[in-house]
Amino acid sequence: MKNLKKKMKNKTPNNTNKLSLIDHFEELRKRLLYSVLILIITSSIAFVFNKQIITVLLNGLESEIVLRNGDIVFVEIMEMFSTSMKVSLLFGFIVAFPFILHQFFLFIIPGLNTREKKSIFIFLPIVILAFGVGVCFGYFVLIPPAIGFLLNWGSEIADPMIRIGNIINFELRLVFWVGLVFETPLIMMFLGYLNLLNAKQFARFRRVWIVTAFILGAFITPTFDPINQSFVAIPLIILYELGILGVKLIQKKD
């Protein structure tokens, strides 16, 4: 009887762990399903209004192209449709981004302590706001000079005929990546809030970050123009400094 009781005690934790693992994957499946459903809904709505969204993306740029005796065209039979799909998916993702983040945090919150849960509820709305500010910065500040530079380059030799897919891909790529890099100070502050890194450690990598900022500037704005690269690199350097300041304030408060 004693041996039987010991065997039963030994089996109990294993069964509990197995159930916990199954529940864990079930929760993950549910959160992923909700995220995919909301993405499908927002992308479908965006597809209905894709012409209006494309018009907004081209607003202010079409006049620049027409002034150079060019026009916006599509040269492949599927190009306009594929462009509409890309715009719908990205716009749908931007609209669904807060909900997807919420689902992600609902999945990880049970494994966090009170301090980490508090930090998530503080940083979540700021993360969404920073992404939106980055998207607006890319659209209103970076795109016009980048397009102007690219259209002026070689315009005395050939007249531009801009493909709709090319210019939309350029804009979507730029605003999306700029929106992400605007999360830099928040990531730094979050790491500082959890005491994983401090302001002095971030300050040591300042020179490395300056070089990285210009590399990212060249990647995000695919031009060899240092002025356009600086439009991305300088805000990144400023954001990094703001992140260091934020980490100092957070850790000083603690």
Image: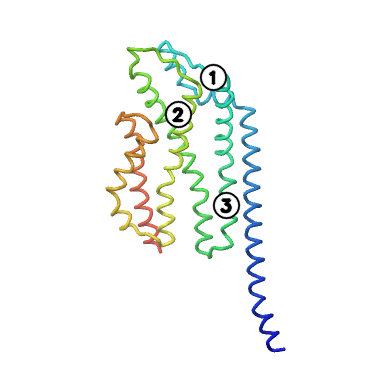
Determine the residue located farthest toward the front in the rendered image: 3
Foreground tag (2 vs 1): 1
The residue that label 1 is drawn on is 76
Name the residue: 38% across, 61% down: 251
Instruction: Judge whether 246 appears above or below 230 on screen.
Output: below
Quarter that holds the N terminus: bottom right
Point 35% across, 23% down: residue? 149
**Position of 254 relative to 2 (above/below):** above
- Looking at the image, which residue sits at the far bottom? 2
What's the amino acid at mark 2?
Answer: Phe
For numbered disc 3, what is the local secondary structure?
Answer: helix
Q: Which residue is mark 2?
A: 170
Amino acid at the residue labelled 3: Phe
Query: What is the C-alpha distance between the residues marked 2 and 1?
Result: 18 Å
- Judging from the image, what secondary structure is the residue with disc 1 in? loop
Percent coordinates x, y for residue 174 in the rendering = 44, 33
Q: Callout 2: 10 Å neighbours few (<14), some, many (20+)?
A: some
The alpha-carbon separation of the residues under discs 3 and 2 comes to 29 Å
- Circles 2 and 1, Cβ within 8 Å, touching? The answer is no
Q: Residues within 10 Å of mark 1 (few under 14, many from 20)?
A: few
Question: Which label sits in the foreground, 1 or 3?
Answer: 1
Quadrant for residue 5, please give it. Answer: bottom right
Left or right side of 68 for 19: right
Q: Is residue 175 toward the left or the right of residue 26 in the image?
A: left
Where residue 104 is drawn, which disc sits there? 3
Q: Please tell me which residue lies in front, 254 or 83.
A: 83
Q: CA distance from mark 1 to mark 3?
A: 39 Å
Residue drawn 65% across the image and 47% down it: 34
